[in-house]
Image (cartoon, rainbow, N blue to C red):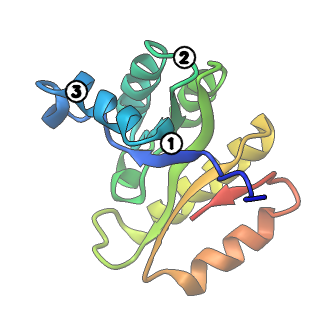
Amino acid sequence: MQPKPFPLLDIGVNLSHESFDHDRDDVVERALQAGLQAMILTGTSVEGSVQAAALAATQPGLLYSTAGVHPHEAANFGIDTSARLHAILQQPQVVAVGETGLDFFRDFSPRPLQEQAFAEQLTLAGQCGLPVFLHQRDAHARFLPMLREQRDQLCRGVV
């Protein structure tokens, strides 16, 4: 008896990006034909998270989304960002916090701002009981200690 295969999921889909405006439905259809059973659309900013959640709501059970601020966008993490993300995370199709983490390779946002945004999103994940969709590039030495600081509050995650 052969073991039953795991469902095929794509957890890092940028389907809400404007480059898919002309063929988004075709992309989803091709994914289904290839055996994909679900897609998780990635939120990388508050606005992007709103867009991903709205798109995911159009195909329940197939499309899901995350809500978060990517480290490249951490300089835009404002005083109300956590509250805005928290509101998005209450929607049933939003299943994780992220994409969040640290990216010290390109440093598109200053490192202290990346760390602050990452810490706030880890706290948010713990408060909401949701997993984290993590990003780490050339930041291992700081990334792991920050995760360890909050690991007891986190349920799970993927890097």
Q: Which residue is mark 3?
A: 26
As drawn, the label of residue 60 is 2
Q: Residue at x 54, y 16 (%)?
A: 60
Please tell me how crowded label 1 is: few (under 14), some (14-19), or many (20+) other residues with Cα within 10 Å: many
Image position of 149 (left or right of 13): right
Q: Which residue is mark 1?
A: 68
* Amino acid type, mark 1: Gly
* Residue farthest to the bottom, as pictured: 141
Is label 2 in contact with label 3 (beta carbons under 8 Å)? Answer: no
Image position of 28 (left or right of 100): left
Q: In which quadrant will I find the C terminus?
A: bottom right
Q: Position of residue 40 (x, y in %)?
A: 49, 38
Q: Position of residue 64 (x, y in %)?
A: 53, 30
Image position of 42 (left or right of 105): right
* Residue farthest to the top, as pictured: 58
Image position of 99 (left or right of 150): left
* Amino acid type, mark 2: Pro
Please tell me how crowded label 2 is: few (under 14), some (14-19), or many (20+) other residues with Cα within 10 Å: few
Q: Earlier in the sequence, mark 1 or mark 2?
A: 2
Q: Position of residue 134 (x, y in %)?
A: 55, 60
Q: Residue at x 49, y 80 (%)?
A: 139
Q: Is residue 42 above or below residue 146?
A: above
As drawn, the label of residue 36 is none
